[in-house]
Image (cartoon, rainbow, N blue to C red):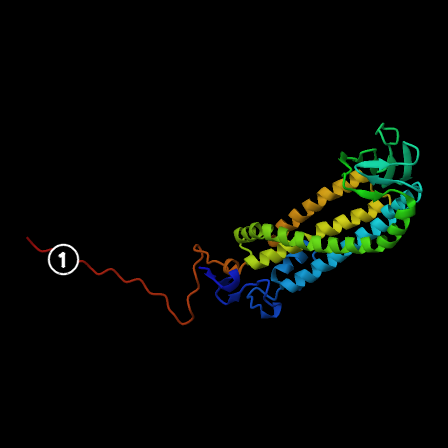
Amino acid sequence: MRDKAEGGCYLFPDYRCASPGASMRDMDSPVGKPPFAWQPLTPRGVAAFAYATLGRLLVVQLIVALLAAGTVVWFLHTAWFPTISQAITNLPAAGEIRAGRLDWQGESPASLAESRFLAFTVDLKHEGKARSPAHIQVEFGLTDYNVFSLLGFVGGEYHRDWAVPFNREDLVPWWGAWKPALLGITALLVVAGLMLVWVVLATIYALPVWLLGSFANRDLSLGGSWCLAGAALMPGALLMLAAIFLYAWDVFGLVELAVALALHFVFGWFYLVAGPLRLPLHPAAAGVKENPFVTQAKPQGQRAAEPKEAEPEPPAAKQ
C-alpha cells in the first residue's frame, strides 16, 4: 500500500521518493544511486531530472533560454536589421503618417529595401506592382499597410491618432539610438517568455507523465514528473535553435523552418513518453515474485516428515 507523504510524494517501505525540493544526496533508494542530471539531450538524461532539484532544472532551462535569446538577437542583427537600416536610409527627406494617411513624397510603387528575409515597399494604391520574393514583405499604402508571407497576408489601417515620422531625417537618428536597446529588450522577452511557457507546459504535462510512470511501475513522484516534463521540452527548443541558424545561413528555407517548428513539438512529446520509461522500476514492483510451481528448499537440519503408516483395521465382530 502506498502512503501519501508531504509535498505530494508517495512513500514505500524503506524508500523516499524525489520531489522538486529534495536533494539528490537525501535520496534513499534501494534500486541504486540516482543518475546525475546535467543534460536533457537523451531519454535517460531527461529521466534523470525526475530525481533532480527544482533549482537544477531551472538552471538548465535558463541556459537554454539564454542560448535562444542569443540566437534570436543574432538573427535579427544579421538578417533583419540591415534591411531595416537600408529602408530608413532610402526614405525621402520629408514625410509622415498623420490623421490616418501616409504623406509620401516619393514615387509609388517603390521598393525601399529588399533581402532574402525581409522587404519594405510603398504602394499607395496596393496595385501589386511592388511584390517581392522576400519571405516577409511590408507594404505601406495610402491609408493602410499589408504584411505578406508564405502563409498569406495581414493588414491594418493607420490610426487617426498616429503622428509617426516617415522620413530619413527623423528616423535615421532614432533607429541608431534605439537599435541596441531593441536587441536587449528582445533578449529579455525571449528569456522571460520561454521560462514562463516552459513552466505552464510542465504543469500541463506533469499529470500525464506521472500516470504513464505509474502504469509502467516506474519510480516516479508527481513532483519528479513536473521536473521531468520541464526537461523534456529542452531537446525541441535546441532543435528549433539549430533550425534558425540553418535558416539564417541559407541552408533552410521558410518551408524547412516551418517543418522544424512542427518537429520541435514532436520532439517534446517523444521525450515526455520516453523519459519516464527510462526510469528504474519502483522497488515494490522490482521484487522477484515466488514461483508457485517450484518446490522451495527446506531449511538445513529439518527432516521431511515421514508419512504415517496406516493403522490396521480392527477385526470384524463375529456374528
Q: Nearer the viewer, residue 280 or 52?
A: 52
> Can the viewer see residue 291?
yes
Residue 168 at what x, y percent from top left? 91, 45
Above or below — where is 292 with respect to 264?
A: below
- The residue under the point 79% across, 49% down is 242
Quadrant including the N terminus: bottom left
Q: Above or below — where is 262 with respect to 8? A: above
Identify the residue at horizontal 71%, vertical 55% (top origin).
192
To which quarter of the image does residue 105 belong?
Answer: top right
Measuring 61% from the left and 68% from the top, which residue is drawn there?
23
According to the picture, the residue beneath numbered tag 1 turns out to be 315
Residue 294 picture quarter: bottom left
Location of residue 98 in the rendering, given as x and y in whole percent from the top left corner: 82, 39
Q: Residue furthest top?
A: 127
Residue 73: image location, x then y, percent: 81, 52
Q: Amino acid at mark 1?
A: Pro
In the image, residue 71 lies at what x, y percent?
80, 52
Disc 1 secondary structure class: loop
Q: 165 or 189: which is nearer to us?
A: 165
